[in-house]
Amino acid sequence: MNTEDSVSTELLKSHAGDRKNTSLKPQLESRFRSIDVYAALFSLCMSALLVLGVFVLDHVFSPQFQIVGASSFALLVVIAVVGSIPLYLLTHWLFLRIDVLVARTHEASSETDTSAVLNSTKSEQKHVGFSALLARAWLKYSSLILLGWVPYFLIRFPGNIDSDTYWELEQVYGLVPRNDQHPYFDTLVFGAFWRLGDIMHSHFISLLLYALIQMIVTAAVLGLALCYMRYIGVPRSMTRVSLIFLSTFPIIPFFAETMAKDMLFGWVWVLFLLGVMEAARSRGNALRIPWFLIGFSVTVLLLMLTKKTGVYLALGTIVIMLVFLKNRVRLLCSLLIPLMLFLGVWTSALLPRWNVTPGPEREMLAVPSQQTAMYIKRNSANMTRADWKVLSRVFHDPQSLPLTYTPARGDNTKGRWIEDASRADKEAFVLWWMEHFFKDPGSYMLATAANTLPLYYPDISTEGSESTLFYGDKITPQGQDDNGLIDTLINYSGGKATRADILELMGGTNRYPAVSTLSTTFNTWYLNMTRAFPIVFSKVLYTTWIPFFALAYCLRRHQWLGVLCMVPAMLTLCTLFISPIAIPRYLVPVIYTAPLTLGCLFIGVNARRMSLEGLNSNRIDMDQAK
């Protein structure tokens, strides 16, 4: 073969290679584009969190480390990546199924009237509005939910009461100094029912009436949420599943029948989320309706009054809404007026007048105190006299903090905080805390990860029976006393209350023996169910997996209204991360609103983009402000 032939052959090979490369490149690009990026990110993050949970269980909760060395850590990374693949396939499939549902809803929505305003010439146009939907379905949904709760109520007749509520009731009867650690508004509500029991000579009646009223109100609010889901275009099948969940999932009626601050806050939170969703769906136009604006403002005020974190949740949510929605002045008023009433009237005027002292600052220090205990546990040999001097001024006996340290619960460590420490000593501790983070960030991260384990991992063991979604029976049978609780309540009073005082306070709330036996039997069965189906009864499903799944889908579809509606869920998760413990009753808001969270996937499908300039607000109803 001559030189020219060899050159020609090489050129042909080169051109063939170029054609192969040019045909391969689009294929690779096409395959890359076919990857569902948001499903992949969600899957990888959730898989990584599962692996993190395994690591934390090994390094904090286990007596001896099993995961050590670079090879073990490399294996964890591989497991996280490989484990994300089946999770990705499942997530991608679910996203595609939701795409179909959204498309069907959009097609159905396009057939309805999209006129901006109904005037006299168009009044004959048919449109099934929210008010018509309420008239047709609200009572039905609420009644079905209540009916589903009846068996659970009979199991714990006449209701349930949290131990913290007894401490609030001690304040009502002067056995404990008045304190706003638990919202004093809640204390007044519970105290009113307890005083009613005094008049009727039975706290059995107090608990029964409260449980029934709270169940009715909660069922009505959840029924309203189901109506709203229908209104925004959530498929009927999904609404039916939500109805079954709300009416039969045991933890929900157990929450609804319990006298406690979290359960009182729960239904208020549902109303707040409904207001946020409608304000977002209407691009802020709903705020032009007087009754909506007033109702939303009252809900914001109740949010602040019924739970300490309510003010931060309302503030954070509405500030973010101000950036994206219209009618900002009205939206700002819905925040500022309740905030002024809460801070200016309630906190600064009424509570001092009633001699109610602020709650202790240690309630905000669960995470730093846990981190400090973990740091001491791992580094005590290297700590200097100056370190101990700083800590001893803000903690009682800091050397023993590791002995009282409980990885899943921050109550013991934050309880060592010295409330009357000087400002200078507290500032010195903050500087020490920040400085030592850089010396051993691993201790800080491990302590935080251990304290919040149920929020990102399906934990079934670290918090005993409360590791899963189980809320126990807090009331003893007739003829039996809860001596541990009695001693605790006497201790809360500083010795002021006697055993007789506490027994009188708790009098009449004991269960009938047969009911108590039934409750105990059900508890055993329920705990077995939580172990058999840990995912369904895990906290992480409702605090993290469902909200982030919904967020990932909304981002994937560029569904910005849905993303905005996810802000309350994200802020709630943040408050849970700084809590001393993730006990089940702290999760009341996220469980009550789980269906609404998934409803955010459809929030923009049926939204009407209406211009309301120049309209008389009296002519606008909720059906037209979309």
Image (cartoon, grey):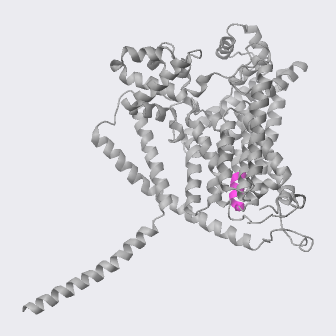
Task: Quadrant for residue 152, please give it.
Answer: top right
Q: Position of residue 525 (x, y in %)?
A: 62, 36
Question: What secondary structure is the magenta-colored segment mainly?
Answer: helix
Q: Position of residue 23 (x, y in %)?
A: 34, 80
- Regarding residue 468, the answer to whether it shows in the image is no
Q: Which residues are magenta?
A: 234-243
- Which one is nearer the viewer's eye here, 102 or 566? 566
- Regarding residue 251, the answer to whether it shows in the image is yes
Give the residue drawn at x 64%, y 69%.
103
Q: Looking at this rendering, what residue extends furthest in the right direction? A: 120
Q: Position of residue 420 (x, y in %)?
A: 59, 14
Q: Is residue 167 left or right of residue 413?
A: right
* 264 over 28 or under it: above or below: above
- Which one is nearer the viewer's eye here, 43 or 114? 114
Give the residue drawn at x 75%, y 23%.
513
Q: Which quadrant of the rendered structure holds the N terminus?
A: bottom left
Give the residue drawn at x 50%, y 41%.
457
Magenta residue check for 287: no
* 161 over 555 or under it: above or below: above
Task: Quadrant for residue 439, please give it.
Answer: top left
Q: Is residue 266 left or right of residue 624?
A: left
- Which one is nearer the viewer's eye here, 154 or 407? 407
Q: Position of residue 94 (x, y in %)?
A: 56, 61
Q: Is residue 581 left or right of residue 74?
A: right
Task: Quadrant for residue 101, please give it.
Answer: bottom right
- Which one is nearer the viewer's eye here, 232 or 60? 232
